[in-house]
Amino acid sequence: MLHSSAILGILEKLMRIFEDPYWWTVALSSVVQLTMFGRWIYRRIRNDEMMRAFVEDMAKIHLPHTYALLEGICDRQGIKTPEVRKSTGSTCTSPAVEMADFAKARK
């Protein structure tokens, strides 16, 4: 156990450190840098989440409508559209939407 004189000695050293204005400068700049880093990492994570949601929305909702419109344009122009997809052999002209979630693979 520490004696009371040892505890007082430690407290005196800490008080001298806090009285020094240079330590306050270091402490304040460290807190500001930590705050800025926290804001930056939060924005980066949030941006990644929004990008993932955008890509998923485009793939599931907008691409099927786009392919349907392209098929309509091809019909009006007299262009023959392919009926069989080579990879799966299905009779669908629009590609299948399969989202790869890499975040689950890391867990």
Image (tube, rainbow, N blue to C red):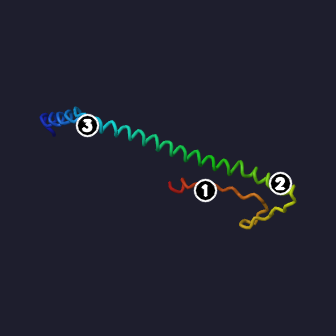
Q: Which of the labelled discs sits on residue 73, or is there none?
A: 2
Front-most of 22 and 87?
22
Is residue 4 left or right of 29 when viewed as pictured? left
Q: Residue at x 42, y 43 (%)?
A: 37
For the residues bearing labels 2 and 3, Cβ distance under 8 angstroms = no
Q: Secondary structure at mark 2?
A: helix
Q: Name which residue type carries label 2.
A: Ile
* Residue 25 found in image quarter: top left
Vertical relation: 70 (above or below) 30 = below
Q: Secondary structure at mark 3?
A: helix
Front-most of 32 and 5?
32
Q: Name which residue type carries label 3.
A: Tyr
Q: Name which residue type carries label 1.
A: Ala
x, y (%) of residue 26?
30, 39
Q: Earlier in the sequence, mark 2 or mark 3?
A: 3
Is residue 37 left or right of 104 when viewed as pictured? left
Residue behind mark 1: 100
Q: Nearer the viewer, mark 2 or mark 3?
A: 3
Q: Earlier in the sequence, mark 2 or mark 1?
A: 2
Q: CA distance from mark 2 to mark 1?
A: 30 Å
For the residues bearing labels 2 and 1, Cβ distance under 8 angstroms = no
Q: Residue at x 87, y 55 (%)?
A: 76
Q: Nearer the viewer, mark 3 or mark 1?
A: 3
Residue behind mark 3: 22
* Residue 19 found in image quarter: top left
Q: Earlier in the sequence, mark 3 or mark 1?
A: 3
